[in-house]
Amino acid sequence: MRIHRYFLFVIIFYACGEKKLPILGERKVIEREKEGKIVVDTIYHSIPEFSFINQDGQKVTEKTFEGKIYVADFFFTTCPSICPKMKQQMLRVYEKYKNDDRILLLSHSISREDSVPVLKSYAKKINIETSKWHLVTGDWNKIEQMAKSYFVGVQEDPNEPGGYLHNGYFVLVDKQKHIRGVYDGTNPKEVDKLLTDIDILLDEK
C-alpha cells in the first residue's frame, strides 16, 4: 500500500499495579507558572472538532461522543476489497456492545458517491441502529483531514478498485478524545485485542 504510515509515540501508564492502555500520538511538554512555581504539563494528541452528517441526515459532531468511548474507521459502501472484511469485524464490536450506552461506533465514508440515502440503505443492509453506529459523510477534504487525526491514510486513486485507497484500521478513542489503540480491522485476532482493550478502557479510572 502506498499510503504514508504514521509513526505512533506511545506513552504507557501504570497505576496501582494495573496496566492501562497507551495514549498514542505525539505529545507536547509545556511549562507554565502557577503560584510562583514552574509547573510542567503534557498535552497529548486528541481528535479535533468535526461536523458530518449520518445515515439519518442528522448532524454528528464531537459532542455526539461526549463522555463516550468510541471506535472509528474509514470505508466506502462500494469498496470491493477490504471494506467487507472490515464491516464483518466491526459488526462483532457492534453486537458485543449494542446494549452498552458507554460505547459508540463511527464510520466515515471516503466516497463522494456515498450520499445520505446510500448510507441509509447500507445501514439497513447490515442491520444496524443509528443510535449506536453512525455512518457519516461530508466534505471530502475534511474527511481526509480527519483521517490523518486518526492515523489513517485515505486517498482518491482511479487505478484502485472502487477509485479509493485507505487503511483498514479500527481506532479506539477514549472519553478525552485520546487515541488508545489502532487495530487491523481485517484481522480477527487484532479485533479480538480491540474487544479486550475496550473492556480494559471501560474499567479504567
Image (cartoon, rainbow, N blue to C red):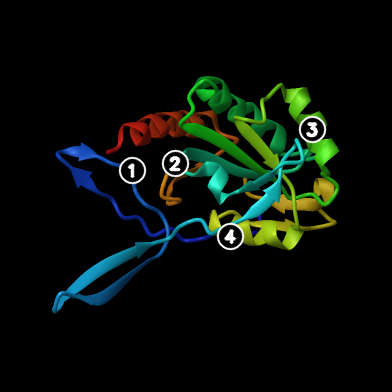
Rendered residue at 85%/56% (across/down):
158
Q: Amino acid at mark 2?
A: Gly
Q: Position of residue 188 (x, y in %)?
A: 54, 28
The answer to whether any part of residue 10 appears in the image is: yes
The alpha-carbon separation of the residues under discs 2 and 1 comes to: 18 Å
Say whether disc 2 or disc 1 marks the residue closer to the N-terminus: 1
Rendered residue at 38%/29% (across/down):
199
Say whether residue 75 is left or right of residue 117. left
Quadrant placement of the C terminus: top left
Q: Residues within 10 Å of mark 4 (few under 14, many from 20)?
A: few
Q: Which is in the foreground here, disc 1 or disc 3?
A: 3
Task: Determine whether the residue tagged by mark 3 lies in a helix, strand or loop.
Answer: helix
The alpha-carbon separation of the residues under discs 3 and 4 comes to: 26 Å
Say whether disc 4 or disc 1 marks the residue closer to the N-terminus: 1
Say whether disc 3 or disc 2 marks the residue closer to the N-terminus: 2
Residue tagged 4 = 148
Residue tagged 3 = 120
Quadrant placement of the N terminus: bottom right
The alpha-carbon separation of the residues under discs 3 and 2 comes to: 26 Å
Pointers 1 and 3 in contact (CB under 8 A)?
A: no
The alpha-carbon separation of the residues under discs 4 and 1 comes to: 21 Å
Pointers 2 and 1 in contact (CB under 8 A)?
A: no
- Disc number at residue 67? 2
Say whether disc 1 or disc 3 marks the residue closer to the N-terminus: 1
The alpha-carbon separation of the residues under discs 2 and 4 comes to: 23 Å
Say whether disc 3 or disc 4 marks the residue closer to the N-terminus: 3
Q: Residues within 10 Å of mark 3 (few under 14, many from 20)?
A: some
Q: Which is in the foreground here, disc 2 or disc 1?
A: 2
Task: Determine whether the residue tagged by mark 1 lies in a helix, strand or loop.
Answer: loop
- Disc number at residue 21? 1
Q: Amino acid at mark 1?
A: Leu
